[in-house]
């Protein structure tokens, strides 16, 4: 089945690892031209090498890596210019770059609060503002934000991330209304709400763990059990990427201001 992304141009922020990298791969498999960014040049180059090895049939000219920090407006604007110079336009913006802050109220300093709010808001606002003039020219434009179930279901051990995630969900809804009739055919804005997905973030927490007795598989299974995830496991990055592909693509052409829950049943809200 075609997702209607053939020859369309996608940007994935934070595409050098985890969910972003799997999204890059799915878009390329679907025939899209894909640009992705990250802050670290070596990680980006490693991801490009991985993608090229996985898809030898895809032309290298359909892939573009750009070093950019989504919190640095200037570097985001430079990235957008490079993407448009290379591919000629932008159809899909996938705002994925970021990470969470594990800290309780007592542990969260004022600068952590500011850091989380800045990351969750401007990590999305900077790319949207820079890409907007080009999205307006697309007849299938979409913005898809990677968000967390914390937006609806706050956790005490991630208090600042939860509060900032709720704000991002609210912002995404307003932007969906604001952009519904903007440009050639409107720009759809949707989000995925992730529970826990195996990725770089969890690998880093695994490396920093205090109990060194468990293997990665045992540690991950323990987290799923401890947190009470009904499906009994963490999600795979590709499972989040599939939801992103659906929301970004014209397959979801009458969906905006919406969310897909990718949490293995963790959310009990109706
Ligand atoms: P990874 O750490 O595997 O990937 C994060 C990616 O974002 C990397 O490519 C990283 O590259 C890039 N990145 C981080 N900060 C910036 C920045 N300021 N500017 C540009 N690129 C950046 O994590 P995940 O795949 O798990 O995370 C993807 C998204 O999903 C994040 O927004 C995360 O908060 C969210 N999420 C993940 C959950 C999970 O369980 N995995 C749960 C809830 C939400 P580099 O470091 O080189 O910049």
Image (spheres, rainbow, N blue to C red):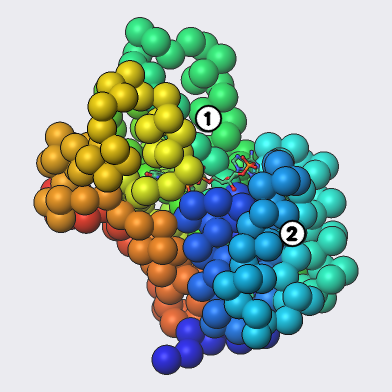
Which residue appears farthest toward the right when viewing the image?
A: 85
- Give the number of callouts: 2
Q: Secondary structure at mark 1?
A: helix
Position of the N terminus, as image quadrant, is bottom left
Residue 262 appearing in the image: yes
From the viewer's perspective, is 200 left or right of 155? Answer: right
Residue placed at 27% from the left, 45% from the top?
Answer: 217
Q: Which of pointers 2 and 1 lies earlier in the amino acid sequence? A: 2
Q: From the image, tell me which residue sits under label 2.
A: 65
Of badges 2 and 1, nearer the viewer stands 2
Nearer to us in this view, 113 or 258: 113
Q: From the image, tell me which residue sits under label 1.
A: 117
Instruction: Say few, some or many: other residues with alpha carbon within 10 Å of mark 2 (under 14 / 14 to 19 / 20 or more).
Output: many
Q: Looking at the image, is 232 positioned above or below residue 185?
A: above
Residue 135 appearing in the image: no
Q: Are marks 2 and 1 in contact (CB under 8 Å)?
A: no
Q: Secondary structure at mark 2?
A: strand
Q: Looking at the image, is 203 positioned above or below residue 183?
A: above
Position of the C terminus, as image quadrant, is bottom left
Which residue appears farthest toward the top when viewing the image?
A: 106
């Amino acid at each position: 089945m075609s997702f209607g992304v053939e020859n369309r141009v996608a940007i994935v922020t934070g595409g050098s690892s985890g969910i972003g990298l799997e999204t890059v791969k799915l878009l390329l498999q679907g025939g899209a031209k894909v640009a992705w960014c990250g802050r670290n040049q070596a990680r980006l180059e490693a991801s490009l090498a991985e993608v090229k090895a996985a898809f030898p049939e895809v032309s290298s000219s359909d892939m573009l890596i750009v070093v950019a920090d989504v919190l640095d407006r200037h570097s985001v604007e430079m990235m957008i210019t490079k993407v448009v110079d290379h591919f000629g336009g932008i159809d899909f913006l996938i705002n994925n770059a970021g990470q969470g802050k594990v800290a309780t109220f007592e542990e969260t300093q004022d600068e952590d609060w500011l850091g989380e709010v800045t990351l969750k808001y401007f990590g999305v606002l900077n790319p949207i503002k820079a890409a907007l003039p080009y999205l307006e020219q697309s007849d299938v434009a979409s913005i898809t934000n990677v968000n967390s179930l914390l937006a609806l279901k706050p956790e005490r051990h991630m208090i600042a991330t939860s509060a900032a995630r709720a704000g991002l969900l609210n912002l995404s809804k307003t932007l969906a209304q604001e952009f519904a009739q903007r440009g050639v055919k409107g720009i759809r804005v949707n989000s995925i709400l992730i529970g826990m997905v195996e990725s770089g973030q969890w690998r880093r927490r695994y490396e920093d763990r205090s109990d060194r007795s468990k293997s990665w598989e045992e540690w991950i299974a323990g987290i799923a059990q401890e947190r009470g995830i009904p499906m009994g496991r963490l999600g795979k990055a590709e499972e989040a990427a599939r939801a992103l592909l659906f929301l970004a693509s014209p397959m979801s052409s009458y969906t905006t201001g919406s969310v897909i829950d990718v949490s293995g049943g963790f959310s009990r809200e109706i």
